[in-house]
Amino acid sequence: MIGLGKEKTLLDLRGVTRVFRTGLYLGAAFRAVDDVSFCIREKTCEIVAGESGSGKSTLAKMALGILRPSAGEVLYKGRNIFRLRGREKKEFKREVQPVFQDPYETFSPFRKVTDYLEATVLNFGIAKSKKEAIRLIDDRLRRMGMDPQEVHGKFPHEFSGGQLQRLSIARALMANPRLLVADEPVSMVDASVRVDILALFVELMADFNMSVIYITHDLSTAYYLGVQTNAEIVIMYRGECVEKGSVEEVLINPLHPYSKMLLDALPEPNPQRKWTSRARLPSLTLKEFRKTGCKFAERCQYAAQICFEKRPPSFYVDNRAVRCWIMEEKGGTP
Amino acid sequence: MGRIIELQNVSAYYKIGRELYVRAVDGVSLSVEEGKILGIAGESGCGKTTLIKVCTASIKPPLTVAGGNVFYYMEGKRIALLALNEKELRRLRWKFFTLVPQAAMNSLNPVKKVGAIFSETLRACIRSMDKARIKEIVHECLHSLGLPSEVLGMYPCQLSGGMKQRIVVALATITIPKVIFCDEPTTGLDLVTQKGILQFLQEKAKAANSTLILVSHDIGIQAQVTDILAIAYAGKIVEIGPTEEIFARPLHPYTIKLISSLPIIGDRSSKAGLVGTPPSLIRPPQGCRFHPRCVLAEDICERKEPPLIERRPNHYVACFKSGEVRG
């Protein structure tokens, strides 16, 4: 797989599962994330793509140590993050920083944005005094192409969505992180500035020797960031990782029927290349919580008997992990 | 094919204080032909939704129409929409035009079963039809949207967001209106459901020769679905023309940037976004509203407002420098 260089492993998710129990379904267990594994090395980018309800945000919360997995473990530099205590725990919290979807929710409308930047610097003991903190903040803002004079003393509503998202990234950077976990960081930003924020991630990875987990529902931004960072992509469907491999390979030549269906439904901004097939609308959402077999079987046009009976393992084919029985016929190894 | 709807110099402002207005729609003129699919694209806060509100006469304070006219062409007659009273409007709604509002899935009556919502809507429009025929129409419509007939016996809260949205879309097309307005009809839905809903709308509109007006910030959707595309920026229409023409030969600097900054799978080139931020609509910039962010801006752009001019057949653009863009 990609990034198999000498770089050390930073974060390692091993068979992570999260079960939510809800009274609504008569106490039925709902597996929001089901046996997902991937690892991020230093200075690499990992992309997690999936539709709403695929469990990608739950996965992000577990990677950040906010949510405990029901099974499996999350290792940071080889240690289980939920067993860290004291200084080590603080170190983890500093080195793994989140960037959230809605920048208007990240910042309280009643506080100046620089308050957040300052608090981050002081809380993690990166600067000793307020003066030093401001110097650091100004330095980071400049490196992100923002004028510190335009930021100081302002409240969140005085910025546009794109600027505020940059500040949200700047806040995360104040902690000198090794890993950013960015959950849908550009989905609330206007299309015409999206590419610039994605480019910022690429620059920052190089400048700060940082890794990024980019979580998105948007496959075209996943591709854009992915090819520039030589990233690995994880395609999620109902809590499972259905396909994992290099961005270029998975998005250009998808193997799992679900990945194929997603890419086929993508509206390409080119009227010369309109949709050629009809959408197969999911009508069986009522039977959502089926227990056996492949979770995609009902919607899959290639589904065979085995798909309804036995859950497929991940098969390894051409440098990829694909959770589909078809791959067994193609000579994949479980 | 004649005109079905025409906007003449429409302005609609939100009153936010004494003599203080958000000029969400400012001097917009356009006309749409029968049976066409018109897309309105633009970024958040450019006035797309306000424009739809004016076109459907859903104007409530603080929104006020500051000027202009909206005309519907109905059986050879010209109707001034904004002059109609509530009773006359009710006669047009559902029969002549329908609206799928933003976040439409929440607009279903929560205490009525889906079946009751359907029969109520249909009965209000088509008085002379027998029950069996109505049932047939509803089932056919649900089937083509991939919904099982059981949903008719369910309450909206028992359905997923995507299913509710499909029901709203079904309702908007089932009365076979002449004009269907859709405001971000698929935002927040997954890709496959989105494609299904858009294909359904497209087919229904074409089959009944209805006009579809589709507001979406998603340029990909506009490219896939629309015949004619209007690009809105800061309360103005800056460019309008046949969709293929807009993508092949965009003339306004804003449109050019908007299209060229989109990431596309398979395209490895690095792209640059638009610098600056959208202007305030309370005090919009003098002259062309795009000039503070435009790379081609000159003196004239700061002083004078560019008119919408036909630069190529059916392709209109509001820019003094549009001839030089593709140098």
Image (cartoon, grey):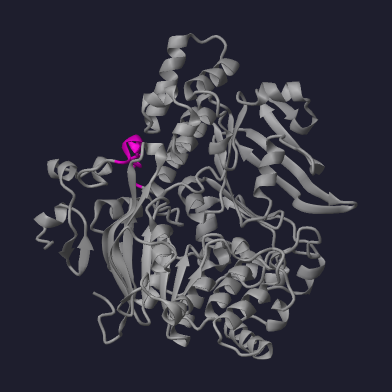
Look at 50% across and 53% down and name the residue there: B244
Residue lying furthest front:
A86
Look at 48% across and 35% down and name the residue there: B164
Q: Quadrant of the N terminus of chain A?
A: bottom left
Q: Nearer the viewer, residue A80 or A209?
A: A80
**Does residue A212 sit above or below B98 in this rendering?**
below
Magenta segment, prevailing SS (helix, strand or loop) = loop
Q: Residue B92 location, x and y as percent?
A: 67, 24
Q: Nearer the viewer, residue A35 or B285?
A: A35
Q: Quadrant of the C terminus of chain A?
A: bottom left
Q: Give the side of residue B245 with respect to residue B264, left or right.
A: right
Look at 58% across and 34% down and name the residue there: B107
Q: Nearer the viewer, residue B123 or B37?
A: B123
Q: Which residues are magenta?
A: A276-289
- Mark yes or no: residue A140 visible: yes
Q: Give the side of residue A225 with respect to residue B86, left or right.
A: left
Q: Quadrant of residue B306?
A: bottom right
- Mark yes or no: residue B30 visible: no
Q: Quadrant of residue B179?
A: top right
Look at 55% across and 25% down and name the residue there: B111
Residue B66: in magenta span: no
Q: Residue A129 location, x and y as percent?
A: 65, 89
Q: Give the side of residue B279 with respect to residue A78, left or right.
A: right
Q: Give the side of residue A149 with respect to residue A215, left or right.
A: right
**Does residue B26 sit above or below B153 in this rendering?**
below
Q: Residue A184 location, x and y as percent?
A: 48, 62
Q: Residue B52 location, x and y as percent?
A: 66, 41
Residue A283: in magenta span: yes
**Does residue B155 sit above or below B130 in this rendering?**
below
Q: Quadrant of residue A222?
A: bottom left
Residue lying furthest right:
B18
